[in-house]
Image (spheres, rainbow, N blue to C red):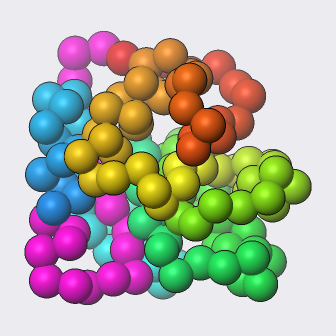
Amino acid sequence: MNEKIRTVVSSESEVAGLRENIKLHLEASQKIEVIGFSTTEIAAIRQQIVRKKPDFLLVDHPLFHSENLPELIGFIRKVKKHTPNTEIIIRGPKLVDDETKRLLEAGVFAYINEQVSNELLGPAIETILQKGSIANPMVTIAPREVDWL
C-alpha cells in the first residue's frame, strides 16, 4: 500500500497545541496523514468520519477511568455501527486485562497506554498497522488480520 493511512484524531482535550503536537508526531512516520480532528462526542466523530472517510480513528482519551468503561464501550459500538470500515485505536490510562479485553470485543483495534508519548505514537501505530502486532507491554491489539501497509 503506497497511500498514506488517513486518520482522524478525537480528543477531549483542547489544550492549545496538543492536537497539533499529536498530528506532528503521527505524520512524522511519513505513512500516516491526519485529515481531521474532533471532540469525543459521537455526533462530532460521525461528522468527521462520514465527511473524511478515514482509515482509522485515534481516540486520545486521557480522562477515561474504569468507572466510565460502559460509556466508552457504548461509544465504540456506536462508532463501529455507523462506520464499520474505520478502525479505532484508543490511547488512555492503564487498564486491567479484563477491561482491555472488553474494549477489544466492542470493536477497538488497539489500546495504547497513555504513557506512550506523542513522539512514539506514530511509530507504534505504524507498527501495529503494518504487522498486526507490536512487542510493547503498553499496547494491546485485537487478534485479527490486517492489511494496511
Q: Residue at x 22, y 15 (%)?
A: 2
The quadrant the N terminus occupies is top left
Q: Residue at x 82, y 51 (%)?
A: 97
Q: Position of residue 52 (x, y in %)?
A: 28, 56
Against 75, residue 53 (above or below) is above
Q: Position of residue 77 (x, y in %)?
A: 71, 64
The quadrant the C terminus occupies is top left
Q: Is residue 19 magenta?
A: yes
Say which of 49 and 87 sits in front.
87
Residue range of the region highlighted in magenta in the rendering: 1-20
**Residue sitting farthest toward the right:** 98
Residue 12 in view (yes/no): yes
Say which of 110 and 119 sits in front.
119
Residue 71 in view (yes/no): no
- Locate residue 33 relative to residue 122 in the image: left or right: left
Against 3, residue 57 (above or below) is below
Q: Position of residue 70 (x, y in %)?
A: 80, 77
Q: Is residue 145 magenta?
A: no
- Locate residue 40 relative to residue 105 in the image: left or right: left
Q: Position of residue 71 (x, y in %)?
A: 72, 81
- Locate residue 78 relative to residue 102 in the image: left or right: left
Name which quarter of the figure residue 48 lies in: bottom left
Name which quarter of the figure residue 140 lies in: top right
Q: Residue at x 73, y 28 (%)?
A: 143
Q: Residue at x 56, y 23 (%)?
A: 135
Report how many numbered discs are placed on residues in the image.
0
Against 96, residue 70 (above or below) is below
